[in-house]
Image: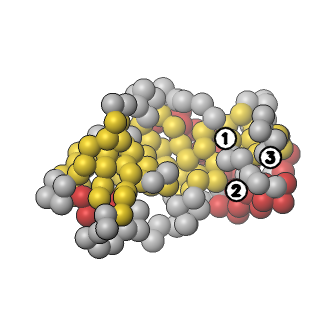
Amino acid sequence: MLKERYTVFEGKNGKYYFNLKAANHKIILRSSDSYSSKKDATKAILWIQSNCTNPQFFERRVAKNGEPYFVFKDDTGDILGVSETYSSKYAMENGIKSVQKNGITKTILGIDDVFFEVIINKRQFDLQKGRYGRSHFLELGGYVGPRFCLFQLNGFGRREILPNQQVDVVGCLEFEVVRND
């Protein structure tokens, strides 16, 4: 199991982004903007690593739907990272504590290798560029056994990935898993 880590990845638009993830794969902070290079994304990560324990860089906000969230700013006021929205202020405060605890990690994936964000039933994972079989995606999402169908989602609908098929991860992908019984 991976520890807490930052992942730099290339988005569908060719720009770079980063996520800070806890050991349970949950994103606790995501880049607020895109970067034109991995180097620029890494600079933002280095700044967060050095300053994430300082409460002055966290700004608490409320989304349009009334749910609390926070942003992480640098010393000039530019927003470097944004949290998810939370169900309560208490949960948001726990999110800030998690960034303060996990943000100091020196583990950064995607600097020397190429990683892409893969979404499986709305859960996000970091996957290195390469070719993977159907079973790899199912296991990654926690789906084990023959009763599951894997569908790759795209702008036109979805296509089923059959048991013997491989999928090239050369960009961000999204999958849906459906129980087949």
In percent of the image, x 78 and y 45: which residue is there?
Answer: 67
Q: Is residue 89 left or right of residue 128?
A: right
Of badges 3 and 1, the one in the foreground is 3
Q: Earlier in the sequence, mark 3 or mark 1?
A: 3
Counting from the top left corner in percent of width and height, residue 56 is at: 85, 45
SS assignment at label 1: strand
Can residue 96 be seen here? The reply is no
Q: Pointer 3: what residue?
A: 68
SS assignment at label 2: helix
Counting from the top left corner in percent of width and height, residue 119 is at: 43, 49
Can residue 60 be seen here? The reply is yes
Q: Pointer 1: what residue?
A: 81
Q: Pointer 2: what residue?
A: 99
What amino acid is labelled 1 in the image? Gly
Q: In this rendering, is residue 5 above or below 64? A: below
Q: Earlier in the sequence, mark 1 or mark 2?
A: 1
Q: Nearer the viewer, residue 76 or 32?
A: 32
Q: Is residue 55 left or right of residue 41?
A: right
Q: Nearer the viewer, residue 28 or 68?
A: 68
Whether label 1 touches label 2, CB < 8 Å? yes
